[in-house]
Amino acid sequence: MKIIKDKNTLHKEILKNNGISFIPTMGGLHKGHVSLIKHSKKSKLKILVSIFINPKQFNKKSDFMSYPRNTKKDIKLLKKLKINYLYMPSFKDIYGFKPKNKIFLDNASKKLCGKFRKGHFEGVLNVVNRFIEIIKPKYIYLGKKDYQQLYLIKKHIEKKKIKSKIIECKTIRENNGVACSSRNLNLDKNQMKIASNIFFYLSNLKKKIKKNYNLLNINKIKKELINLGADKIDYLENYNIKSFKKVKKSNEKFNIFFAYYIKNTRLIDNI
Ligand code: PAF
């Protein structure tokens, strides 16, 4: 595995290859990332993972500062997984040039996390757009846990007629049901139990709602999440997973999207 810190060196290395499979990350690697990497191996292309904690997608400095960082452990894991390149750029390497494409922000960016984390998706699209221009990956692997992010990146790629293809990968969960996330590293045992209880409550409820849509009572569900130990709920809403619009008919394919806090840790998921 070659560790590369600047795009000039990166270009010299990757141009030799016949396409790249790219997994963008902010480090704090977990089973979800491992699954994306394993998935990317099927492409038979060289695999490039990036670790860059993008300050522009954090709306609070404190959130940026407390984002889990464990580079040594991450590098060890990536070596074990035998990826080809690890790109760990500086801020200047990423933001020191003018990208050809402007970002396209679909209207779906105004909902859910977009409402509660001002500027978050502009920040995500900004960095992903730059990564795409630097790496020109054939495939980009993204998880469905961050479904709104995945949706918006796909819309940007579609609108700007970018050749990279997004490969959507299923959400990987801990044995206790909680979606794998770098932020889980900030949870203690008791808090993890709360997150697990919330997951099981919502996934059982979703099964019932699918049979009887009238059971979907958002305010009642939010109250139950607080009873289960959530300290604050940013949102809990259901959307059609194809159109990202409000569900009108009970036979539509929808997911329940939610974001909540346990103490200072913000968790998101969709079921
Ligand atoms: O999902 C993430 O880890 C980040 O939002 C991403 C896609 C690496 C962009 O910084």
Image: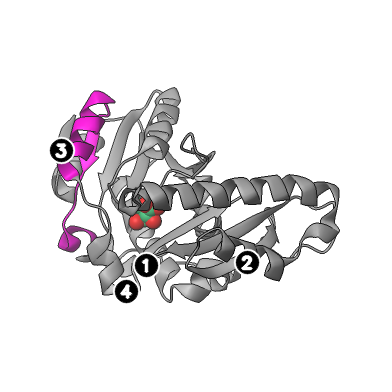
In 3D space, how far apart are the residues under numbered discs 3 and 2 (Cα atoms)? 45 Å
Q: Mark 1 vs mark 2: which is more N-terminal?
A: 1
Looking at the image, residue 160 lies above or below residue 203: below
Q: CA distance from mark 1 to mark 2?
A: 29 Å
Residue at 14 percent of width and 47 percent of height: 5
Query: On the image, numbered disc 4 is attached to which residue?
Result: 60
Residues tagged 3 and 4 counted as in contact (Cβ below 8 A): no
Write down the residue under mark 2.
Answer: 222
Tell me the CA gap for discs 3 and 1. Answer: 25 Å
N-terminal of the two: label 1 or label 4?
4
186 or 50: nearer the viewer: 186
Q: Amino acid at mark 2?
A: Lys
Residue toward you, 235 or 119:
235
Dot 1 amino acid type: Gly
Q: Name the amino acid, label 4.
A: Lys
Report the image quarter containing ligand 1: bottom left
Reading the chain from its start, which is encountered first: label 3 or label 1?
Answer: 3
Q: Is 84 inside the magenta-drawn segment?
A: yes
- Residue neighbourhood size for the residue with mark 2, other residues' Cα within 10 Å, grouped as few (<14), some (14–19), many (≥20): many
Q: Which residue is mark 1?
A: 123
Q: Which mark's residue is nearer the viewer, 4 or 2?
A: 2
Q: Is residue 61 magenta?
A: no
Residue denoted by label 3: 3
Residue mark closest to the camera, 3 vs 2: 2
User: Is residue 201 at least partly visible in the picture?
Assistant: yes
| Residue located 26% across and 73% down the image | 61
Q: Earlier in the sequence, mark 3 or mark 4?
A: 3
Question: SS of the residue at dot 2?
Answer: helix
